[in-house]
Image (spheres, rainbow, N blue to C red):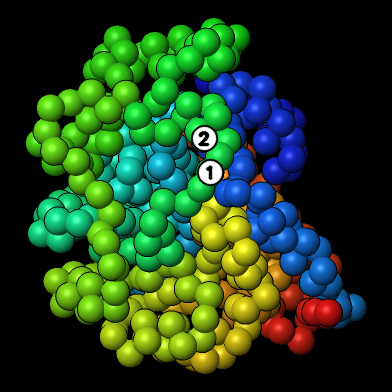
Amino acid sequence: MLVREHKFLNFAEARALAKNRLPRGIFEYIDRGTEDEWALKDNRRAFERVKIKPHILKTATTRSTTVNLFGHDYAAPLVVSPTAFAGLVWYRGEVELARAAAEFGIPFCAATEAITSVEEIARATTAPLWFQLYLWNKEEISYNLIDRAWNAGARTILVTVDTPVMPKREFNYRNGFDVPFQLSVRNIVDVALHARWALSVLGRYVLSSGIPNFANYPERYRKNLLKRGTGPSLDLMPDLSWEHMRRLRDHWKGNLIIKGILRQEDAILAKQLGADGIVVSNHGGRNLDSAVSPIEVLSEIANSVGSSITVLADSSIQRGSDVFKLLACGAKAVLVGRSMLYGTAVGGAAGAMQMMKVLRDELGLTMDMSGCRVLSDIDRDLLLCP
């Protein structure tokens, strides 16, 4: 299904369409935060507090949003963030997103907890593939997984380190949307009321391959979303530490990015152990509910590590002006998750590409309005921060 451009013109419209099309459990898993959702709300308030002081009479006839990341040129400073369950917003949603990213010209980062394997995603895209890692409690199995990613063509891994324990997402429990999924009258009725999704997404999986599972897990540990399976479980690495990062650095031959940093000293440690990049992130307001917003600490973190390491940022980006503000604070590019899932939910690859275009065009418009011809013209002097 193709999406006409007028279907949505911005993040809010795409979100509203996705909310209408997806069962409540899936939509709220993507959309909401944790506990009282203060971090989620404050992420948006932090963007709103930062204002732009534009230059005038500097608009150029040619303007570029291109960026070079780890030796590759991309059309915009956007990275499709790794997200669990992307394959549930659209049939083979991870593949649709990867194809859209390749055609648009931005990186796609495949997730550990995807329902499509990294090998299958790699076969579907011609763009450089990134891979996200949650380190399991069986370290050698995690290494086997990133070796699979390497063999599939990934040369950049992004290790998520800000989830030492599972956060308290009460809405997931209420909706029965956790692993294993909890069937109830409420969510069965909810799925029935979203017949289009039930038939075109869940129904196609059931008919083709059965109830979806985490395809990157080794066969022995793989269970479907109802947690049906006979093998043992894999859990997150307990007592995750910098020593684990050092061993990972020794093992992985490609680019290593550490995601979830909010303090200068952690950024400096990441640089010292040989990481190639960091992501300043509070997990989109989905983990620690009292965590600081990335834009509030991004400048000091970027200044502390300098240009010898690639600084990225994410969390609750909705407009191209949000991207502009993060770039001005020192990020070289940003990761976007929710917006990509909403676009995909509306129309698969075509919807995802429309969202990419919306964010790139809004960024370009903000650059034009602020007198910036290229991304390197965007700097801290353009911002007024309370």
Q: Which residue is mark 2?
A: 172
Q: Quadrant of the C terminus?
A: bottom right
Residue found 43% across the figure and 17% down from its top: 183
Residue type at tag 2 = Asn
Q: Position of residue 286 (x, y in %)?
A: 55, 52
Q: Which residue is mark 1?
A: 169
State the residue at coordinates (60%, 58%). 289
Real-space Cα separation, disc 2 to disc 1, in angstroms: 6 Å
* Residue located at (69% from left, 61% from top): 43
User: In the rendered image, is residue 14 in sight?
Assistant: yes
331 versus 180 height, above or below: below
Horizontal relation, residue 51 to residue 179: left or right: right
Quadrant location of residue 382? bottom right
In depth, the one of 221 and 130 nearer the eye is 221
Q: Residue at x 28, y 54 (%)?
A: 236
Q: Which quarter of the figure has residue 14?
A: top right
Vertical placement of residue 110 versus 156, above or below: above
Please tell me which residue lies in front, 35 or 65.
35
Q: Which mark is residue 340?
A: none
Q: Residues within 10 Å of mark 2 (few under 14, many from 20)?
A: many
Q: Pointer 2 and pointer 1: residues touching (CB < 8 Å)?
A: yes
Residue furthest right as drawn:
56
Q: Secondary structure at mark 1?
A: loop
